[in-house]
Image (spheres, rainbow, N blue to C red):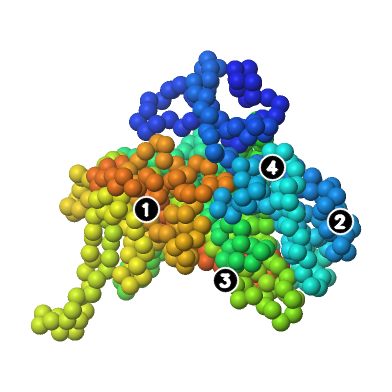
Amino acid sequence: TAVLRARKGVGSGWRYASIELVEPAKNEPAGSARTVRAVCWHAGDGRTYRAEMSLADGEVTRWEYLPGQQPSITLDEWHECDEMLRRHPALIDALARRGITNLSLVLTDVWAYGAALVPERHRGLRLGWSDVWLRGSQDGNPYAHHVTGLHPIVDLNQMALVELEDNPPPIGLPDVRGEYLPELTGGTLREVSPLHVVQPDGVSFTLDGYLLRWQNWQLRLGFNHREGLVLHTVGCTDGGRLRPVAHRLSFAEMVVPYRDASPDHYRRTAFDIGEWGLGFMTTSLERGCDCLGEIRYLDAVVHDSRGEPVTIPNAICIHEEDDGILWKHVDERSGAQTRRSRRLVISFHVTVANYEYLVYWRFYQDASIECEVRATGVMVTSAFPPGSQPATGAVVDQRSYAPYHQHFIVARLDLDVDGQPNTVFACDSRPLPAGTDDPYGLRLVLQETPLRTETDGRQDYNWQTQRYWKITATGTSNSLGAPPAYKLVPGSTFPPLIDASSAVLRRAAVIGHTLWVTPYHPAERWPCGEFPNLSAADSGLAVWTQQDRQIADCDVVLWYVFGLHHITRPEDWPVMPVDRASFWLKPVGFFDRNPALDVPPGPPHGDTVPS
């Protein structure tokens, strides 16, 4: 910030959308010069710039004007917009006509636009649109009462109301039961005995700065404003040798289209990573609530729109969990042999206005990796007149419905299985027809198809063949003669079920396929483009893959699309029990045999805590 203020006059009237250290390129030697990249814009003329600076000498090495690009919306803008609107006479009058006069109970919640939905009269502005919500009391749930038909349109640069859509419904707010705090629900809480998770001898992982070691695993932890938690240089020790599995694992985009064309919801498509940033919205974790057991926390540092540092205490949680049985066999002579599974969990939690996303990367003793996202929080709802229930959502309270919607999460998996190069295979199980050599029609074979170009790399899950994808090391083999590999085991994946002409698909082509495979390129980080805010068309994967580059025998990146197809229900209201979405990375021939044979048996009374 100081460098840009001194060298480029970035001061009053400017905002920062992002400041981040430029990650070292692959195979770049340690100790290379540290560079910072920033995106900032002037709120007066709306001009956006990308800067790069050398920390060694404080010089600006790049100052690039980005015409037509709108950076992500900042949390400062969100709060400032809410404060401005609740003081604005036009909104105050519109609320008063609905009988709402206590502005301390009102919340406005600004959303980003897609360019195709921006009215012609407002084009060129840094535009946002907003919902209006009403709390039932000072501590009440703000998302319990949607002020239907009332939507401010805001110029975020001038922080000014440019239009107020005011279409009051024929009747007032419905009488809903939208509170979840115990002191507001009026109910009694069930009795639950305490559950203690203790490790009297301490944890079995070590944390040296950001270098994490556990069992046979080793990796480095990173964090940035946009992706939040990033896992770097993931490797597994085998026979005294650290073997690479992944260079970088993260979430690159999250697309949430609401599937309701009503005036309250037709604009409601969020790019939670590209338009807002998971890092900015990461929340502090609390022992006993968010994580149980012996915990190690890491803080994260992001920044506000003035470029000042903001520390998020306890942003990342690291702990171990029991995971039931790892492997077991009972022999009539030697008896039972049982090993309990333990997993290392690295997690962070994000609050995106009404929704929470809880992200867990889990590492297992059999060298598997699981990624799970849990969604919770409060659903968006709207009121409807009696007898006119919309077909595009579920009734969750009196005259209130929650629209059906989808959460598409794009995991960016920069895999280096046993190093480089790698080749990806689509693996399909195929039954063979019955014949004279198989009169019972029992034969099942695995068809492995190499993906050689980016066109091949556009893949969809096939339930009929139980498709998965195998990432193999090229030019090496295990002791059984097969190439070492990891497989991507798909889960929580679904088709977009959206019309091909939709603006959502034009802005987020990535959701049209389950998997995309590209050759590694350091500039290709964002699957829907670097600036999806107010975007008209996708400038990410949809553009890159038109080159149809070779993806066989090279350094590959997998973009896996998974998430939640949320058909809403009353049980999700007023606060939603977690819904889970996950996928796995599992070794296939990476080892010659079960890599968890060396896990020791547990003590006969392993759950006993010494007094």
> Label 2 sits on what residue type?
Asp
- Alpha carbon distance from label 4 to label 2: 22 Å
Q: Which mark is residue 93?
A: 2
Q: Earlier in the sequence, mark 2 or mark 3?
A: 2
Q: Is 365 in front, or is 503?
A: 503
Q: Earlier in the sequence, mark 3 or mark 4?
A: 4
Residue at position x 68%, y 32% in the image: 44
How crowded is the residue under tag 2: few (<14 C-alpha within 10 Å), some, or many (20+)? few
In this view of the protein, can residue 457 be seen by the observer? Answer: yes
Q: Is 488 in front, or is 397?
A: 397
- Alpha carbon distance from label 1 to label 3: 26 Å
- Circle 3 — which element? loop
- Circle 2 — which element? helix
Q: Earlier in the sequence, mark 4 or mark 1?
A: 4
Residue at position x 31%, y 45% in the image: 547
* Residue located beneath label 4 in the image: 156
- Alpha carbon distance from label 4 to label 1: 35 Å
Q: Position of residue 211 (x, y in %)?
A: 48, 36
Q: Earlier in the sequence, mark 1 or mark 3?
A: 1
> Label 1 sits on what residue type?
Trp
Answer with the quarter of the image where residue 260 lies: bottom right
Comparing marks 2 and 3, which lies closer to the viewer? 2
Q: Is 140 in front, or is 46?
A: 46
Comparing marks 4 and 1, which lies closer to the viewer? 4
Residue at position x 28%, y 59% in the image: 426
- Alpha carbon distance from label 1 to label 2: 50 Å
* Residue located beneath label 3 in the image: 567
Q: Position of residue 189 (x, y in %)?
A: 76, 69
* Residue located beneath label 1 in the image: 516
> Label 4 sits on what residue type?
Leu
